Image: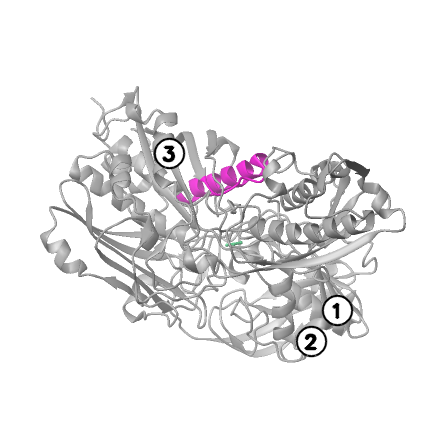
Amino acid sequence: MKFDTPAGINPIDRERVIGRPHPRIEGPLKTTGRAVYSYEQHDAAPDAAYGYVVGSAVAKGRIARMDTSAAEGAPGVLAVVTAANTSPVKASGFYKAKPLAGPDIQHYHQAIALVVAETFEQARAAAQLLRVDYSRVDGAFDLTAARAGASRPKDKPDIRIGDVDKALATAAVTVDSTYTTPDHSHMMMEPHATIARWDGDQLTLWSAQQIVGWAVRDLSGKIGVPPEKIRIVASYIGGGFGGKGSVNSDAVLAALGARKANRAVKVALTRPLMPNNTTHRPATIQRVRLGAGRDGRLTAIAHESWSGNVPGGMAEAAADQTEMLYAGANRLIATRLATLDLPEGSAMRAPGEASGMMAIEIAMDELAEKLGMDPVELRIRNDMQVVPADPGRGGTDPQGGTSQADKSAGPKPFSTRQLVQCLRTGADRFGWSKRSGVPAARREGNLLIGMGMASAIRGAPIQAAGARATLRTDGLVSIETSMTDMGTGSYTIVGQTAAEMMGLPLDRVVVRLGDSQFPDSFGGGGQAGAATVTAGVYAACVKLREAVASRLGVNSADAEFTDGEVRSGNRRVPLKDAVKAGPITVEDRIEFGDLSKRFEQQTFGAHFAEVAVDAYTGEIRLRRMLAVCAAGRILNPLTARSQIIGGMTMGAGAALMEELAVDKRFGFFVNHDLAGYEVPVHADIPHQEVIFLDELDPTMSPLKAKGVGELGISGVAPAIANAVYNATGVRVRDYPITLDKHLTRLPALT
Ligand code: MOS
């Protein structure tokens, strides 16, 4: 199926199953422990041995000598895999750092060996017997210091429209502020985990992967096994947030270890290895300059962002969304990338926007205060409905979002843009009118109370997708497609799509996901998954309806699939009658034309937060959070809400606690476990409310839907930061806002 004109009315619009708050269909399997995660595939590999990953003890340098003999002779040990005794592992694919180092070391905890033994304990014990001598060299570990040497990435042309400097020089009111965001760790609950098994030259991996197609491609590129010889299964995934976007050391070393040991091998990364061995969200330094007239209309908007990475690694595209967010005749968007010898930075939930909104949305709060204008009103005044023409546009970023969409030079209208409606609804529902425009003006005893808000924007990418649909002889419809469910609700919305299309209740659909041998439908990434996979399932179901109609001898064009029947004219036939002679299986794929080039496809929202700050201790407590979102058709309000509140929780972490502390002498993240890397817990998160505005986006897909998995985090941290400022009158521009950053400056209580 080709989708190249905006969708008209179709069976999805009935919304008998789609758009309804169905609990996730795999929920009972998860709550009863029957959902089998990668590391638990005991039936698939009952004889699996255990692999233990050993990470480098230095950040940069070489392995001078490694003696593996003691480890190899230790009880139960089957093999020790190192770069010296396996075929070369290439840097190839989405993640750029090598999953196996040696002799050169690129970053701290980069894998240098996999010890394979009969039991986990034996593998771990033997790993302590490796003798490794390093020659360590100094590296670049400090973004502030490396910033001077940063350069423009090739795929990130500056956007320069008008003359920002001139406009700033003549603006009635200006802001020129620099903000910093730290490195963040994904810290998903399920660690990176893989079981690998060879059957002759055929390799099967049960692996926690968000995108099984990318995993096949990248594993093939890294270890030189043809893609058609690799199968990757990811039935259930305990979170990923971008950290499982492609193969990490667990998958690559499990494959190599299984080959060397001639046994299936299972590898899970230990929690303390994860932050330095795998990827993280890179730190940024961001300078935002705004110029406005007294009426609040922006005349200049400039957002520059610096980040660092390993050679070949991606820039954190923190400035990009600002191009889409606010009007202003004079514009500058610039991204710079420095080389660092820290672990690789890569995609983490809303890469680009999550960090970028943390700067631009505080800057807007600062501008509103200088203007004496309400921050909601300031944003409404600077709304725009068309992205301005820009000759420099044209970058591509595979992870989706504002930076990822393939862009024309514009001007380009938004397919939908309900930012203003989100702002107004949010202000109304949150009781924004009760906020004092004067900071530190509201008190309850020793508590300083503040409210803050921010806009939200996140790209709405979509990818080509295929699916296989079967009408079985028992009348059930089964769907198979490679899309994964990392806790997001994919199983459920896939089932809802098929149920709606075939006129069945949801419990008459069987959904199978996460296998690279199923028709490809991308995966969970870039908040593209929901729109992508449901479009592929739609295409397959259209074909299944045609096949059913043809078997029943009715015209598929006017056949209605409803209540388990096929109705055409005066005829009503049970759907099941179509499979009296045997099941029907079809497969189709949806391909997209140029609608994403003709229309700017984004999701929008507004975040509101209320905080209480203890004037004596500086402790910040969140009291209330509200998100208002506009993101096309909401396929399932229950699972979509879960996505948004998950994002809001992560945004609260980014605002108040999450930070990988860099040891700038030796080049590693010090707090590399959940004791030291703090994420919000239940006691940190107060009442959360989510409102979805009615929206259909017919330019997206037949479902008229967009994803929401990353919209939920974009804008949350600055809304909280602005609330803290409103409470205290102390502006903190370096995240996270830990109490030490404002304690000595808090107002004295009288
Ligand atoms: Mo995402 S950061 O594209 O999983």
> Mark on residue 34?
none
SS category of the residue bearing label 1: strand
In what quadrant of the picture does the N terminus appear? bottom right
Residue at image point 50% right, 63% down: 398
Label 2 vs 3, first from the N-terminus: 2
Q: Is residue 703 above or below residue 86?
A: above
Q: Which mark is residue 203?
A: 1
Find out if the beta carbon at label 2 lies less than 8 Å from the nearest ligand 1 atom. no
Q: Nearer the viewer, residue 230 or 18?
A: 18
User: In which image quadrant can residue 233 be found?
Assistant: bottom right
Position in image of residue 695 (x %, y %): 47, 39
What residue is shown with label 3?
A: 608
Residue 589: x percent and y percent?
65, 59
Q: Is residue 437 left or right of residue 385?
A: left
Q: Amino acid at mark 3?
A: Phe
Q: Amino acid at mark 2?
A: Val
The furthest residue to the right: 581
| Residue 319 coordinates in the image, percent (x, y) | 33, 56
